[in-house]
Image (cartoon, grey):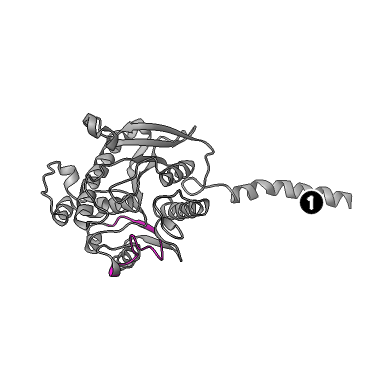
Amino acid sequence: MFKQTIVLIGTLFLSLPSIAQSHRDTRYKDLIFSDVKIDRDLSYNPRSSKGDKKAYQFDLYQPKNDEDKSRPLIIWMHGGGFKFGSKDARGMQIWCKSFAQRGYVCAAINYRLSKNNPLFHFDELLKGSYYAVQDAKMAVLYFKEHAREYNINPDKIILAGNSAGGIVALQTAYSSNADLAKLAKLPDTVEDAKTREIFKVAAVINFWGAIFDINWLKNARVPIVSVLGSKDSVVPPTHKSAPLYGGQDIHTEADALHIPNELKVFDGYSHELQKHFNPVFGVGKDTQKRWLEAGQFAADFLYDKLFK
């Protein structure tokens, strides 16, 4: 009996490495780094004027003590209706930190905000989006040029954002400069050939954002992961009640075009995944938990499409 017990214990210990192996955390999918290094108030436009300097700042989040020299980068863009918001928004901090813990490099960027009233005038929202997209393209080019400095893979740059930031990410990946300028009724004066046509990025994380013209999805095949609340009245899930195309429309059309995509709907929740959207008061712990859940959903999608 004693000998049998010894054999059983030995067998158990021999099996532990295989058990541990089966539960090993996966880079880009799981939170494998405990600490994150943050460099604040850097600039992706060193030539900006003194008055615009803050508009081009970014905070860089990196997994601490990471030795990988070719990491994917996520450029995160905040919400705020093209009138408010910044890289310091709570959502930016939550997503940038958690994705850096998965092994990504994350840049939370500012972009130029409208000096008019885009919240109640759709034509001004279009113009605000146009200029924000130019800034997003500038940020992508900056990181491509500084890929070695930040130890990132220039072919694995992902655009992400919530609300207005999601709108910027989608338009940057799927609209040409001419199309967006025409829609916004602005002159297409951009001369840089690198920013005029469809921008090549690895994927888009669209948190309750939208695309202005659903036909633009025919312009590229960039994977899209979308998250939204079923009762969102600020950026509705479908075109039926808004002059833009929300996450549900994007999912339906992307499926028809065979664009890799996934959609997660939080049933019964409004904009920003709040029970009742309120941009004035702070975001509660329950909402932040839903943001983390949205982040994990996006991380699983990216791992499956880009790294598996």
Q: Residue furthest right?
A: 1
Membership of 230 in magenta stretch: yes
**In the image, what residue occupies the spot 44% across and 46% down?**
95
Q: As displayed, is residue 144 above or below residue 177?
A: above
Q: Which of 260 and 287 is in front in this view?
A: 287
**In the image, what residue occupies the spot 84% across and 52% down?**
4
Q: Which residue lies furthest to the bottom in this view?
A: 240
Left or right: 74 in relation to 8: left
Q: Nearer the viewer, residue 28 or 84?
A: 84
Left or right: 174 in relation to 9: left
**x, y (%) of residue 107?**
37, 39
Instruction: Look at the magenta stretch and give its main secondary structure.
Output: loop
Residue bounds of the magenta highlight: 221-240
Q: Nearer the viewer, residue 199 or 133?
A: 133
**In the image, what residue occupies the spot 46% across and 50% down?**
283
Left or right: 213 in relation to 225: left
Residue type at mark 1? Leu
Membership of 143 in magenta stretch: no
**x, y (%) of residue 172?**
25, 50
**x, y (%) of residue 40?**
39, 32
Q: Nearer the viewer, residue 120 or 265?
A: 120
Q: Badge 1 local density, few (<14 within 10 Å), some, or many (20+)? A: few
**x, y (%) of residue 258?**
31, 64
Residue indicated by mark 1: 8
Secondary element under disc 1, as helix, strand or loop, is helix
